[in-house]
Structure formats: C-alpha cells, structure tokens
Image: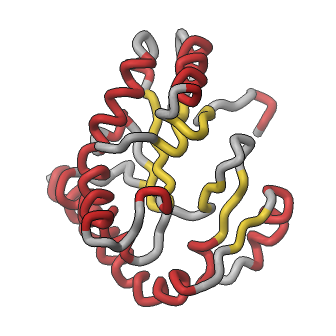
Amino acid sequence: MAVYIKKYISALLCTLMLWGCLGCTAATKAEDTTKSAGALTKDMGNMPTKNALKYTIKLNSGYSMPVLGLGTWTLRDETCEAAVYTAIKCGYRLIDTARYYGNEEAVGRGIKKAINEGIIKREDLFVTSKIMPGDYTRPDKAIDDSLAALDLSYIDLMLIHQPGSNDEEVYKALERGVHSGKLHSIGISNYYTPGGF
C-alpha cells in the first residue's frame, strides 16, 4: 500500500509539473534577470510567475544560482529521470538532489538526456547535491561518488546535508573539491541555532 501511494504521489507531481510547462515557455524566452540577494529578497513577493524560472542570485563563489528549481527528494528511478528531463525541457535550470535521496543516477540520466537532445548545455544547468552523514568519515570519496553517480565533471553546489560528527573535516573536503574544480560552490544545509526560530 505504501509503495502504491508513493508511486501515485510521484506520478501526480510529474503530472502537475507537466501542466506547469504550459506556462514555462514564456519563462524560457524571457530575459535572464540576475539580482543581488537583498534586491531579490525584496522583490520575491512581486516576482512575476512567468519569469520566475529566470531569477538568479549571485553566490559568494561568484556563480549565479537560479532561485527556483526542481527538488528530487521523493523521486526514484524512471519517474525521477523523466521529471528531471521534463523540468529542463520546461525551462528549469536548477536541479537539486543528494546522496541520501538515492537518486543521483536517475537525476544524471535525466540531465544527460536533455543535453544529448540539445535542449540544454551542461554549463547552463545548476546541479546541487549533498554529502550525507554516513559519508562524513570519507568526504573526498563521497564527492567523487556523487560525480560518478551523476555522470558529471563538476557539481555546481555541494552542501553538507546536516550537522554531524566530523562536519568540520567534511567542509575542508568541500574546499578541496573547489580547488580541484570538482565543485563550483559549497555550503551547509539544515544547520540552525536554537535561538534562530
């Protein structure tokens, strides 16, 4: 029953995304708009829907990251591959995955299909992945594993998925990944301070 519900939800998400593609064509033709973090935050409430896929934010690394993208947390196998491919076809340029999601291979296949069909060039995509806690004792290898699973020569943004033991060493591995060209930007995910909420 749980597997059926999970497949139903994945199929529903893909269907909704496909319906959203009807409005995507305007976004893919719109002029690219790059804004600073402050200006973007101020404008988010008034962001026009048809141009939403074109908004980017400049990171400290100097790279620009799209503000909206496809998250793949619940997607698996052929459903994931099709969702990534369709999202790219509709104008999405940010694809988010993680080792923990267990779908980097499917994400990579969706990306490759779009590239091979000439829909997009690799340099026009922004791919995010994350190192999971189970890999915190082998962070350099985890980066290589993600690159291999995605079948990409670099990852645009690699994050530490959540706090854990050895996360300082994991961050140093991310820095080494930047210096070697395997990663363009790095950061942390799901970190917070108790007084922050």
Query: At 84% from the left edge and 64% from the top edge, which residue is drawn?
Result: 39
Image spot of residue 65 (x, y percent): 62, 55
Image spot of residue 128 (x, y percent): 48, 46
Image spot of residue 141 (x, y percent): 37, 19
Say if 61 sits above or below 14 in the image.
Answer: above
Query: At 30% from the left edge and 76% from the top edge, which residue is drawn?
Result: 15
Quadrant for the C terminus in the image:
top right
Is residue 134 found left or right of 117 in the rendered image?
right
Quadrant location of residue 99? top left
Quadrant location of residue 159? top right
Nearer to the camera, 134 or 197: 134
Say if 105 sits above or below 117 in the image.
Answer: above
Say if 85 sits above or below 162 in the image.
Answer: below
Say if 180 sits above or below 15 in the image.
Answer: above
Nearer to the camera, 150 or 124: 124
User: Does residue 130 show up?
Assistant: yes
User: Does residue 83 show up?
Assistant: no
Is residue 195 found left or right of 49 in the rendered image?
right
Query: At 59% from the left edge and 17% from the top edge, which residue is drawn?
Result: 172
Is residue 6 found left or right of 55 in the rendered image?
left
Colouring: secondary structure
- Total number of numbered labels? 0
Query: At 68% from the left edge and 83% from the top edge, which residue is drawn?
Result: 48
Nearer to the camera, 65 or 47: 65
Image spot of residue 115 (x, y percent): 32, 64
Quadrant location of residue 160? top right
